[in-house]
């Protein structure tokens, strides 16, 4: 009996950090039927996380000299930043490398796992693959809308389908007819609420604790939490505030160190220094920066409250992880958290960038155990309903099948609504094709010129290493 041919899916992963995009893809592959699909994951950078994919039996690749193009709340680099120029210069070579790689792998579907992967989307489509673009980040408007217009053009011309994790992402890219909302999901076997139930049942005396997942990052609102921390401790006394994740090492040492100057002027060094001034881990009178934590469920189980004080719109994976652990949440009242937190039911929403309001919400929940327990239970029920791994993974695989069959990917009711209420020209998404063409032309000229000089001269690797050391 002839075995049916497996559908080969090539995933491009822009980051190998222990973050939302990487974990979401890992959880997706855990749900994949290997009798039906054959996955291969392409990492743009080698990373320890690659081993976790290999342990699932997934083929992994790390091509050289391939980069991405960021224009999101998570990372947006202006042209005054050398890393921004590096992305522009490397754009055309990355498209070419993606094209050659996809040609060699010959996948049925290419899944670009981030909105930053526009070079890979273009290269894969030019190589003849069906392309699914996962829009995980909030795309910025930017100066004059040039980069946003370019990404809109890429989405319309080169993506066969878009998967969004927040409402309105398809409209922002001008392609609502291609977009399907599929929330990120959580592994309930890993984030097992029984860990927290056991911790609560022990009843051993311990200081109340507030946890934040996301490290030291401006868009995560770490500084606002540090300021709120002092207000809470002044009101309630001893409360532990724990921040888990990357960051906290500060700028390089030495007043005359050029890397320190660059970090303080172009990077996040100044922001980290401000946070570090408010950290006093030894006497628990400030934030405790604990770095990357492998056992996140146990950290949540031993906490009373999760905070997500983000200052920019983006999907809040820690909120759904807290929901799986029946932990109440305080989060910013902005797109992303607004979809995940039902104010007054599963948690509290507060204005972003407001330490006083953040502190008041934390005090309100830490002072009312019954209210906090009720919100945690409601968050757990919502997580079971909206962030179920099996259901949401199958919705993703169904998009692959519809794309391969050439069927519409957006829900039928969405198409009907579009026909009944066509957007007016004033309210429609802006499509500055001239701006997109200008950006592609500029990237092509600069990229080809610099590529020829540096790469042919054998100096490209050294330049990349220097940029990585200075701004990595």
Image: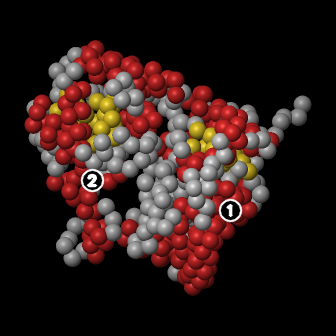
Q: Residue at x 48, y 76 (%)?
A: 462
Q: Residue at x 30, y 42 (%)?
A: 351
The quadrant of the rendering that contains the N terminus is top right
Upstream in sequence: badge 1 or badge 2: 1
User: In which quadrant of the rendered view does residue 400 lie?
Assistant: top right
What element does badge 1 sit on? helix
User: In which quadrant of the rendered view does residue 303 lie?
Assistant: top left
Answer whether residue 94 is visible to the viewer in this image.
no
Of 267 and 333, nearer the camera is 333
Residue under pointer 2: 248
Disc count in the image? Answer: 2
| Side (left or right) of 292 relative to 356 | right
- State which mark lies toward you, 1 or 2: 1
What element does badge 2 sit on? loop
Above or below residue 372? Residue 43 is: below
| Colouring chosen for the image of the structure | secondary structure
The quadrant of the rendering that contains the C terminus is bottom left
Of 48 and 216, nearer the camera is 216
Around disc 2, counting alpha carbons within 10 Å, would you say few (fewer than 14), some (14 to 19), or many (20 or more)? many
| Residue 259, image x, y percentages | 30, 72
| Residue 24, image x, y percentages | 52, 40
Above or below residue 210? Residue 214 is: below
Residue under pointer 1: 123
User: In which quadrant of the rendered view does residue 401 lie?
Assistant: top right
Q: Residue at x 40, y 32 (%)?
A: 341
Residue 205's tag is none
Of 138 and 184, nearer the camera is 138
| Residue 111, image x, y percentages | 64, 49
Q: Residue at x 57, y 56 (%)?
A: 426
């Amino acid at each position: 009996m002839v075995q049916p041919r497996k559908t080969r899916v090539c995933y491009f992963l822009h980051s190998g950090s222990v973050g939302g995009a990487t974990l979401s893809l890992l959880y997706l592959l855990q749900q994949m039927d290997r009798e039906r699909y054959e996955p291969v994951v392409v990492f743009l950078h080698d990373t320890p996380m690659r081993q976790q994919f290999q342990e699932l039996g997934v083929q992994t690749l790390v091509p050289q000299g391939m980069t991405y193009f960021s224009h999101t709340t998570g990372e947006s680099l202006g042209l005054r930043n050398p890393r921004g120029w590096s992305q522009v210069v490397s754009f055309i070579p990355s498209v070419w490398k993606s094209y050659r790689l996809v040609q060699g792998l010959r996948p049925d579907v290419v899944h670009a796992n981030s909105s930053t992967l526009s070079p890979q989307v273009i290269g894969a489509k030019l190589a003849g693959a069906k392309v699914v673009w996962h829009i995980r980040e909030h795309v910025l408007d930017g100066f004059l809308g040039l980069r946003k217009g370019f990404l809109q053009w890429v989405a319309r011309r080169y993506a066969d389908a878009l998967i969004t994790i927040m409402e309105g992402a398809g409209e922002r890219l001008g392609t609502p007819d291609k977009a399907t909302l599929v929330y990120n999901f959580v592994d309930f076997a890993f984030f097992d609420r029984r860990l927290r139930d056991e911790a609560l049942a022990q009843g051993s005396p311990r200081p109340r604790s507030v946890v934040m997942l996301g490290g030291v990052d401006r868009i995560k609102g770490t500084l606002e939490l540090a300021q709120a921390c002092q207000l809470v401790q002044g009101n309630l006394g001893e409360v532990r505030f724990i921040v888990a994740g990357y960051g906290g090492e500060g700028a390089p040492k030495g007043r005359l160190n050029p890397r320190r100057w660059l970090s303080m002027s172009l990077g996040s060094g100044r922001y980290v220094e401000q946070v570090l001034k408010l950290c006093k881990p030894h006497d628990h009178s400030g934030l405790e920066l604990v770095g990357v934590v492998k056992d996140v469920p146990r950290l949540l189980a031993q906490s009373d409250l999760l905070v997500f004080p983000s200052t920019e719109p983006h999907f809040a994976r820690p909120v759904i992880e807290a929901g799986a652990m029946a932990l109440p949440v305080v989060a910013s009242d902005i797109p992303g958290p607004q979809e995940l937190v039902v104010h007054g039911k599963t948690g509290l929403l507060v204005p972003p960038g407001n330490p006083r309001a953040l502190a008041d919400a934390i005090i309100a929940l830490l002072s009312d155990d019954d209210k906090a327990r009720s919100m945690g239970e409601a968050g757990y029920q919502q997580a079971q309903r909206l962030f179920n791994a099996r259901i949401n993974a199958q919705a993703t695989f169904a998009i692959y099948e519809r794309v391969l069959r050439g069927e519409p990917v957006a829900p039928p009711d969405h198409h009907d609504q579009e026909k009944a209420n066509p957007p007016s020209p004033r309210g429609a998404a802006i499509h500055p094709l001239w701006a997109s063409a200008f950006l592609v032309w500029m990237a092509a000229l600069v990229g080809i010129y610099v590529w020829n000089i540096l790469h042919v001269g054998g100096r490209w690797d050294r330049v990349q290493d220097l940029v990585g050391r200075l701004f990595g």
